[in-house]
């Protein structure tokens, strides 16, 4: 499986820089795997495609405002830090720009001194920081940190402050509950609470899992032999209630609709062969590419992904590479909006 097989030319102007004014007014491409038919609609009309009362599974992770502008204490040099994961109380993995040039035991100051960090060491491409703070860390981050938007979304110029404030709500699903992600599960960004309420009142059953999206989801594939790529592990949680809903749906032959690739990776990482007596948690490094079997989900709701990415490989595995290439070329021709703040695709 060659990495170049998953390449395509995307005009930069199709990369969405901000969301549409109303969440459910994104466009929706509908791809039918059985007929290869592609049709077009609005996301607000998603319920038209919920046949036979499926089980819809959402990822309820919540994005942390965790991108910090800091100053290296010794030199006064600016540095940008993205807190990724708390390994133990006060000890964090972090993405740090220019990490190779920063010495161990260097002190970094944030938020006017109310938050400081000392570089304790390195783990692969991540720095290990020991944080010290005055007051509640979450409150400090809510004031001083920015949402960790992907690098293809620019926040510059006179609108920057207003857009960053907007990101705090729009780069978050309306059902986000458990904080810990450094990126939003973007397929869920299109839902309003009203839509979810209406769907749950007879159109579908609803369940939630948690996968805290980390760096693994976005690590580029560097080998031309794409199968050699290894995903970074990410932490998931499945409540007993959700687990048993999935088991019951599979037993009764009901369709399971995964809302997003992160939900898909969790549902395809475990075997729902019997009811659970308690909650289930663990780590997944599942890498789904053409040739891999899908044992749990029947439908997938997703956004439009980067070329040569593990996410584009996943949707190509679920449908077929040929069908996804056809769908993406049609999306480009019809000027769909791509990536995190872009439009949606429903694969049936």
Image (spheres, grey):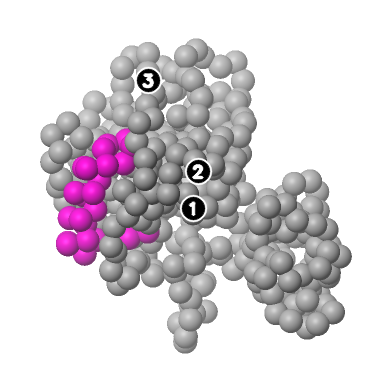
Which residue is identified by label 2?
A: 229
Q: Which residue is mark 3?
A: 249
Q: Are the residues at dot 2 and dot 1 in contact (C-beta closer than 8 Å)? A: yes
- Residue 6 rendering spot, x and y as whole percentages: 33, 50
Q: Is residue 166 visible?
A: yes
Image disc number at residue 304: none
Give percent across and percent down for residue 14: 29, 67
Q: Is residue 305 left or right of residue 319?
A: right
> How many C-alpha atoms fall within 10 Å of the one at disc 1: few (<14), some, or many (≥20)?
few
Q: Nearer the viewer, residue 142 or 332?
A: 332
The magenta region covers 316-339
Q: Is residue 268 above or below residue 76?
A: above
**42 or 105, which is in the foreground?**
105
> Dot 1 corresponds to which residue?
222
Label 3 element class? helix
- Depth-wise, is mark 2 or mark 3 nearer the camera? 2
Labels 2 and 3: the sequence-earlier one: 2
Earlier sequence position, callout 2 versus callout 1: 1
Q: Earlier in the sequence, mark 1 or mark 3?
A: 1
């Amino acid at each position: 499986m060659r990495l170049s097989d998953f390449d395509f030319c995307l005009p930069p102007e199709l990369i969405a820089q901000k969301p549409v004014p109303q969440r459910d007014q994104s466009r929706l491409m509908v791809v039918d795997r059985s007929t290869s038919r592609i049709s077009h609609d609005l996301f607000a009309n998603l319920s038209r495609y919920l046949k036979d009362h499926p089980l819809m599974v959402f990822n309820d992770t919540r994005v942390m405002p965790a991108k910090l502008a800091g100053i290296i204490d010794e030199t006064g040099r600016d540095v940008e830090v993205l807190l990724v994961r708390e390994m133990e109380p006060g000890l964090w993995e972090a993405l740090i720009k220019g990490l190779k040039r920063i010495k161990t035991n260097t002190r970094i100051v944030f938020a006017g001194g109310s938050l400081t960090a000392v570089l304790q060491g390195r783990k692969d491409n991540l720095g290990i920081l020991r944080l010290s703070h005055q007051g509640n860390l979450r409150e400090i981050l809510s004031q001083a940190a920015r949402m960790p938007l992907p690098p293809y979304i620019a926040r510059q110029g006179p609108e920057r402050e207003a857009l960053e404030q907007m990101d705090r709500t729009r780069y978050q699903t309306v059902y986000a509950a458990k904080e810990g992600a450094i990126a939003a599960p973007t397929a869920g960004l299109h839902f309003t609470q009203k839509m979810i309420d209406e769907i749950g009142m007879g159109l579908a059953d609803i369940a939630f899992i948690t996968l805290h999206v980390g760096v693994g989801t976005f690590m580029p594939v560097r080998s031309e032999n794409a199968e050699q790529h290894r995903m970074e592990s990410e932490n998931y949680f499945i409540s007993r209630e959700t687990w048993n809903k999935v088991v019951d749906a599979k037993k009764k032959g009901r369709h399971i609709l995964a809302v997003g690739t992160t939900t898909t990776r969790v549902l395809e990482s475990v075997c729902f062969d019997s009811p659970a007596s308690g909650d289930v948690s663990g780590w997944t490094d599942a890498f789904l590419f053409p040739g891999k079997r899908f044992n749990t989900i029947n439908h997938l709701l997703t956004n439009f992904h980067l070329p040569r990415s593990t996410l584009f490989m996943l949707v190509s595995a679920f449908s077929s590479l040929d069908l996804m290439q056809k769908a993406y070329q049609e999306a480009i021709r019809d000027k769909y909006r791509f990536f995190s703040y872009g439009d949606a695709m429903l694969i049936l």
